[in-house]
Image (cartoon, helix red, strand yellow):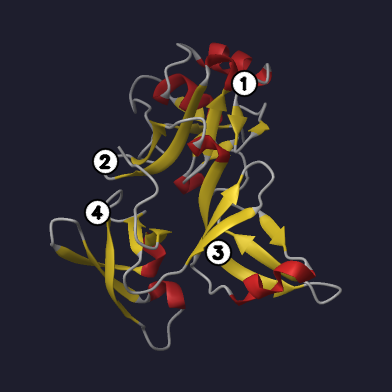
Amino acid sequence: MTHITRLEAPWFLKASKKEYKWTVRASPGPHPLRRSIPLGLLVRDYLSFATTLKESKKIISDGKVLVDGRVRRDYKYPVGLMDVISIPHAGLHYRIVPDKARLLKPIKISEEEAKFKLVRLTGKSIIKGGLYQLHLEDGRNILLGNENSELSKIPTLSTLKVSIPVQSILSVYQMREGSQVMAIGGKNAGAIGQVKKIQIAPYKAKKYSIVIIRNPSGAEYETNLANAMVIGEENVEVRVE
C-alpha cells in the first residue's frame, strides 16, 4: 500500500484530516511508520519547498534531496529522529529533532553540523571471524575491525556521534549520571537536561528503567530510558529550536 487515509495516518503528521482522504504512507525502512515522516511530505509541508505533492516528487526524483549524505529518490522514504536532510543546490541543511507538539520537526543547521548525526546503540552481535557488529537505532550497522575492538564494550543505549555518509565513529556518549540527555518521547519530548539518577528496573529490559532528569531551571522529571537519548557528556551538542 502506497497511501494511507489521513484518519489512520500518524497523528503528528502535518496533514489536514478533513481536506483530502488520502496521504503518503512511509515505506518500510530505517524508521517505523509511527515515528517517521515520508520524505515527500517533509519537502512539501515541513520545509515548504513545494506546494503540491507532484512538485515534491519531482524535486526528490531529480536527486536534489539527501538524507544522511545520500541521495534518496523515493518520496515515501521514512525520515526520522536525528536524520540530516540536505539540499545542496540551495546550501540548506536540516536535522530532525524531537518536538513536544508534533513529535518530530526539522531545524536548520550549519554545513559543519550536517557532517555528523547522533544515533543510539540498540544492540551488538558477533559475526563470522569473531568481529563485532554494532546495531544502531536508525537501521544501520557498523562493523568493528580489530583496531576498534575496544568499542565492542560500549553499553547499549549509549549514543554514537557518527560521520555521514562514511559513518565513522567520532565520539561515544554513555548513559550515566551527569550525562546530558534529550527527551525523545513522552510529554517532555524535546526537553534537555542532566541525568540525576538511573533506577534500574528489576526483571525488565534495560530501556524500561527509570531515569531522573534535571532541566536547566532545576526542575526534575522522570521518564524511562527508552525516551531518553544521551547527547553529550558535559555540553549539549544538538539544538532543538
User: Is 25 situated left or right of 226 in this image?
Assistant: right
Q: Amino acid at mark 1?
A: Ile
Between discs 1 and 2, the one toward the N terminus: 1
Mark 1 and mark 2: Cα distance apart in space: 27 Å
| Residue at the (65%, 29%) spot, across then down | 74
Mark 4 and mark 1: Cα distance apart in space: 33 Å
Mark 2 and mark 3: Cα distance apart in space: 26 Å
In the picture of the structure, the residue carrying the numbered disc 4 is 187
Q: Nearer the viewer, residue 78 or 163?
A: 163
Q: Residue 127 at what x, y percent from top left?
A: 79, 72
Q: Secondary structure at mark 1?
A: helix
Badge 3: few (under 14), some or many (20 or more) residues near its Cα, within 10 Å?
Answer: many
Between discs 4 and 1, the one toward the N terminus: 1
Q: Residue 73 at what x, y percent from top left?
A: 67, 26
Q: How many marks?
A: 4
Q: Secondary structure at mark 2?
A: loop
Q: Nearer the viewer, residue 120 or 14?
A: 120
Q: Secondary structure at mark 3?
A: strand
Between discs 4 and 3, the one toward the N terminus: 3
Q: Residue 14 at what x, y percent from top left?
A: 37, 29
Q: Which mark is residue 121?
A: 3
Check whether the beta carbons of the residues at disc 1 and disc 2 lie within 8 A of each other: no
Check whether the beta carbons of the residues at disc 3 and disc 1 lie within 8 A of each other: no
In the picture of the structure, the residue carrying the numbered disc 2 is 101
Outermost residue to the right: 129
Between discs 3 and 1, the one toward the N terminus: 1
In the picture of the structure, the residue carrying the numbered disc 1 is 60
